[in-house]
Image (cartoon, grey):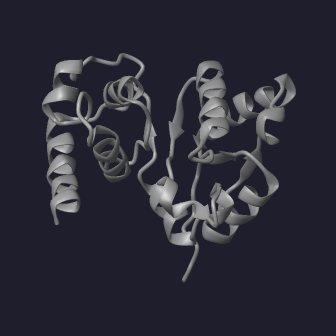
Amino acid sequence: MDRPSIKEIIVVEGKADVSAVKRAVDAQVISTSGLGINDEIISIIKKAAKNKGIIILTDPDYPGKKIRNILSSEIENCKHAFIPRDKADKDGDIGVENASKEAIIEALKNARAELADKVDVFTMEDMIYYGLAGNHKAAERRSLIGDELGIGYCSGKQFLKRLNSFGITREELEEAVIKANEGING
């Protein structure tokens, strides 16, 4: 299988992630050195974002979320790619380096940019209506729907923010809810 070519520079956490991404796609990849991310690395990533654009692809765990938040608060115009937790897990070790080529390609294909002028299409009432908050199955539903939409898994409050920040339409959400219902009930 030919490796798809990605024009943006992909930002990952560590060396093993760099190797995994390069096996999956033809792209330039920058490592943040995990939580060792510093001003020098951020400066390099800012330059990359300005020149070619970046896609942030961090591990689907707490440190990955922390690194993603640091980068997105420092850098404008970045895209976000998410690998579902279950597709990045190898014997309890969660990371991009454990994902298959297919999972990495799928995450990059579904990368989304945050909207500069975000419009709050969804409210907490919508989250409750769609079963994404306020019930015992909400976390499972957010996980399935987040994977389907390519926005990853997170808390209800963060999920609401991502729905609005990434410009998810009501139609996209409703299609994902239907697929999630089939997954939960099927």
Which residue is drawn at the image coordinates 25% and 35% (left, top)?
132
- 116 horizontally vs 96: left or right: left
In the picture, the quarter occupied by the N terminus is: bottom right
Residue that sits furthest to the bottom in the current view: 1
Q: Is residue 168 above or below residue 150?
A: above
Relative to the observer, which residue lies in front, 59 or 105?
Answer: 59
Residue 17: which quarter of the image? bottom right
Which residue is drawn at the image coordinates 50% and 70% (left, top)?
102
- Residue 78 at x, y percent in the picture: 55, 33
Which residue is drawn at the image coordinates 50% and 65% (left, top)?
103
Relative to the observer, which residue lies in front, 30 or 173?
Answer: 173
- 136 horizontally vs 70: left or right: left
- Residue 157 at x, y percent in the picture: 37, 23
Which residue is drawn at the image coordinates 58% and 73% (left, top)?
3
Q: Is residue 108 visible?
A: no
Numbered label tally = 0
- Residue 166 at x, y percent in the picture: 37, 32
- 70 horizontally vs 115: left or right: right
Q: Is residue 168 visible?
A: yes
